[in-house]
Amino acid sequence: MSRSVRSMVKGVLMATAVAIAAMPAYAGDAMTVGLVSQVEPGYRLGAEDIILVSVWKDEQLTREVVVRPDGMFSFPLVGDIQAEDRTVEDIRADLVKRLTKYIPNANVSVAVTKVISYKVYVVGRVNKPGEYLIGHYTDVLQALSLAGGLTPFAAENDIKVLRRVRGEQHAIPFRYGDVRKGRDLEQNIMLQRGDVVMVP
């Protein structure tokens, strides 16, 4: 990465950190509403997400389906389809393949209509603690922004990201003060489903 690009990235992160510090308490709700509708093309589905499957010129095969807790959904003619941890394009290709025996050259489209599975939690000394539904991948700084920023008495360099991996919980440190100063930017990790950002 060139020096100019590194400087630009550092500037963006520092500006974000400053904005978090100055953000009013009510900002989190407004930002959450906006983000839920913005689903990235590479978004991987999870349980409870809702998708719209459309087969051109066949109203009987156009319907909204919910991803079940087992990661599957049911669809006429083809039965159960694996959806969890797959993109809508993965699912579309799978449906086209399975429907071919019934509908040659089936024109299938798949779209996410509601994101429910991608939840992160921000707790502790932030202005708007709680659960946040997010329609795209989010890093720690962005999650803190959603929560309205830190309160004046937050221990900004003792923040932890709690993550459960195969049933075991891990604590990942995040030093907000360092990131705000443009140091150790790699600690601003992307959050995963169910992550808890804890601000003491």
Image (cartoon, rainbow, N blue to C red):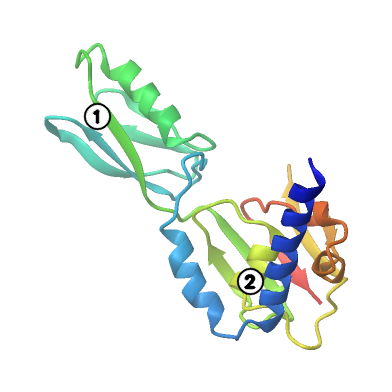
The residue to which callout 1 is attached is 76
Q: Give whichever of 145, 154 is nearer the camera.
A: 145
Classify mark 1: helix, strand or loop: loop
Q: Amino acid at mark 1?
A: Pro
Q: Left or right: where does residue 103 sit relative to residue 164?
A: left
Q: Is residue 61 above or below residue 18?
A: above
Q: Quadrant of residue 111?
A: top left
Q: Give whichever of 183, 2 is nearer the camera.
A: 2
The residue to which callout 2 is attached is 145
* Disc 1: CA contacts within 10 A as few (<14), some (14-19) or many (>=20): few
User: Circles 1 and 2: CB distance less than 8 Å?
Assistant: no
Quadrant location, the C terminus? bottom right
Quadrant location, the N terminus? top right
Residue 103 on image: x %, y %: 19, 16
Q: Left or right: where does residue 174 sit relative to residue 189?
A: right
Q: Residue at x 43, y 43 (%)?
A: 68
Whether residue 169 appears in this view of the structure is: no
Q: Is residue 127 above or below residue 141?
A: below
